[in-house]
Amino acid sequence: MNIFEAVVYGAIQGLSEFLPVSSSGHLALLPHVMKLQDPGVVFDLMMHLGTALAVCIYFRHDLIRYLKAINPSLLNLKQGSEDSWFIRNFTVSTITSVFLILLLMPVAKLARDPWVIIINLSFFGIVLWIADVINGKKQLLNSPMKLLMQWKFAVMIGAAQALAIFPGVSRSGITLTVALLLGMRRKEAGEYSFLLSLPIIFAGILKEIPDLMKHEGTTDVMVMLSGIATSFVVGWLTIHFFMKLIGKINLGYFTIYRLILALAVYLVIL
């Protein structure tokens, strides 16, 4: 892989990580489209590092505020500020995600097949559209993750995120889908989804450090750094514009895109 190819990978990661279209699905399919050797899971994970850094920079003020709210009083579930309730719910979601990811990981390693991606793109795209329609007809909740302990919400969103280890599902898409079905407002659901990705991505990177040190999937550090830098810049721009549009745009457009992409994969690759 050369720098140009890494930049293409990074740009696709930056665009698709925060849109409900499946970044891992795109990255898994790209080697087939560009006739490249699959750079491997470690390289894909490094592209996620770029977008994770974009989340940290974009939501830096929120992250600093949440970190300041971490104290022993969090153990008292009968009281707390909005930030305290958010941290509690966030912790439950993260623990749920980690637990289920560890259970699903052996199966997920076998799921980078184009047929699996086609099914996931189509099915979860349609479910996203249905959730958007239902959400538009419901009486929306007022910041449920910041006002009280929502065990059910936190567990369900965390479990949804775990499913995103299967290419084609879309981490942002599936968490947004569940959040909308639960009655959360779009902007809050988007923010929660983006922040929830951070512990999983950084934990995954730490886990893969031994393979990363061996440069598995790539032979040039500059190639990898080029991809990370591109995914960071494009990811930050995508967050910026998506957060402005999330309350206005019809999510059905993303469903149409996913179905077209699934059809293209079938026609071109299979």
Image (cartoon, helix red, strand yellow):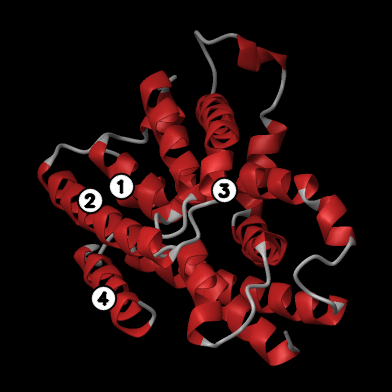
- Identify the residue under disc 1: 177
Q: Earlier in the sequence, mark 4 or mark 1?
A: 1
Q: Which mark is residue 197?
A: 3
**Dot 2, crowdedness within 10 Å: few (<14), some or many (≥20)?**
some
Q: CA distance from mark 2 to mark 3?
A: 21 Å
Q: Are marks 2 and 1 in contact (CB under 8 Å)?
A: yes
Q: From the image, which quarter does the C terminus lie in?
A: bottom left
Of the numbered discs 2 and 3, the one sitting upstream in the chain is 2
Q: Nearer the viewer, residue 217 or 76?
A: 217
- Asked whether, in this view, residue 265 is left or right of residue 30, the answer is left
Q: Amino acid at mark 2?
A: Val
Residue positioned most to the bottom: 4
Q: Position of residue 204 (x, y in %)?
A: 70, 47
Identify the disc placed on residue 263: 4
Image coordinates of residue 234 in percent, x first then y, are: 57, 77
- Disc nearer the start of the sequence (1/3): 1
The amino acid at mark 3 is Ser
Name the residue rendered at 27%, 44% in the picture: 180
Q: Are marks 4 and 1 in contact (CB under 8 Å)?
A: no
Q: Residue at x 30, y 75 (%)?
A: 266
Residue at the disc numbered 2: 127
Q: CA distance from mark 4 to mark 1?
A: 22 Å
Question: Can you give x and y, in whole percent of width and height, for residue 231 in the image?
Answer: 63, 73
